Image (cartoon, helix red, strand yellow):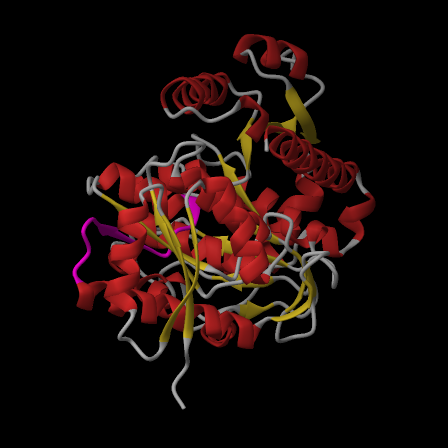
Amino acid sequence: MPDEFNVLIVDDQEETRKNVARLLQFENDINVVGTARTGQDAIKQTIALDPDVVLMDINMPDMDGIEATERIQAQAPVSQIVILSVQGDTNYMRRAMLAGARDFLTKPPKSDELVSVIRRAGAKAKAIRTDVQFISRGTGGLVDPRGTTIQLSGLGKIIAVYSPKGGVGKTTIAANLAVALHSPETPAVIVDANLQFGDVQVFFNERGRTSIVDLAPNVEQLDSELVEDVVLHHKASGVDIVSGPPTPEDGEQVSGTQLVQVLQYLARMYSYVIVDTNSYLADQTIETLDACDLLVLISSQDIPAIINTRAVLQLLISRLGVSKEKILLVMNRFDRQIAISPEKVGHNLGHQVACVLLEDKEVVVPGVNRGIPFMLGDGKSKDIGKGILELVGKVREAISNIENARIEDN
């Protein structure tokens, strides 16, 4: 017997709700289990009815459909959301996808197109339910196929590690941050999003034939089995790795939207998704920085690095609208003998330095050359290791503050 898909229709116009229901009434595998007029009602009914698919209007009296989508994704992440809107421009589509929507259709939708999208989204919801078994919807706990419990308060967290200047230790920090954050209760995956010359797998001394290219073009068919086939499992740390493309040409196959959708799917399976980004602000990097839950911004005491950091802060905050609370500024390779202090840098940038990592070539360089993150060895007890542990604390604190602010806003 084929799967049956339960659908919730959300629109502030009663006539539209009825018309959409009529389009679906002769489909034996599609059941309209409820309707909602407002965004708040949509959230309540999604939690109560647990539909496979939510057909979501953009314009509603209390909140727009994109905000409602974000809240539903935080509270009922299995339900797949399809946006319906008279506004078909790419900006709305991009915002909808970044909010967690599965698909986007313009009004009025064609019957065959609507049915096809519902079946595709519904199949995804069924696959997630099969791959990830609920322990308790009330506590938001999930178990992935490897038996790991994942907390679903807003799903896992996407943490982008970025620096506008190369050579400041960005990948070293990303790798060791992933190791330090990972535990059986809070699994971590690191994604090499440097799509031209990424080398994350080298930092873990791993080799594989699969990469982000095997996930991104198949983003509509992603499931945990495919992810398991693609990731590298680093036994010593427990961290999973999504490698960068094997060649720069392969990296061109990955769009910014695809990359973000992959990261958001990984956040269903892992508590922490660490993204090692490209310094070049291509579309893929900009969309990642926009979509991430927390941005770890790396600078150093070098004047060019400070200048570049100031420029990127202005871009992120003033032009892209990224919240300052979302940016965690880290000063790496700090040398006490240089007169440029973290306080001076923070004052100059107008953004406080949250964490300082001391220069320690005797620990870092051998670890990089051997492909062993220093947090797995004696480096954990050194000043650089203590700095990473402090960074872990800052990351968790920042995520907690962001979550609390989001709850208060709701």
Task: Specify whether 32 is left or right of 299.
Answer: left
Locate residue 198, reporting x and y percent. 42, 52
Write the start and end of the magenta stretch as one range: 99-110
Q: Quadrant of residue 307?
A: top left
Q: Is residue 313 placed above or below 191 in the rendered structure?
A: above
Specify the quadrant that holds the N terminus.
bottom left
Of 63 and 229, nearer the camera is: 63
Residue 199 visible to an observer of this rendering = no
Q: Residue furthest right?
A: 381
Q: Residue furthest bottom?
A: 1
Task: Specify whether 247 is left or right of 36.
Answer: left
Residue 128 visible to an observer of this rendering = yes
State yes or no: residue 24 in magenta.
no
Specify the quadrant that holds the C terminus.
top right
* Residue positioned 67% across, 12% down in the render: 343
Locate residue 268, reporting x and y percent. 55, 59
* Residue positioned 53% across, 13% down in the render: 349
Q: Is residue 330 placed above or below 73 in the rendered structure?
A: above
Of 256 and 335, nearer the camera is: 256
Q: Is residue 204 placed above or below 401 in the rendered structure?
A: below
Locate residue 300, reporting x and y percent. 56, 25
Of 64 and 194, nearer the camera is: 64
* Residue positioned 75% across, 37% down in the render: 393
Locate residue 221, reporting x and y percent. 36, 70
* Residue positioned 69% across, 73% down in the render: 147
Q: Is residue 223 placed above or below 87 in the rendered structure?
A: below
State yes or no: residue 104 in magenta.
yes
Q: Quadrant of residue 267?
A: bottom right
What is the tally of numbered marks visible in this picture? 0
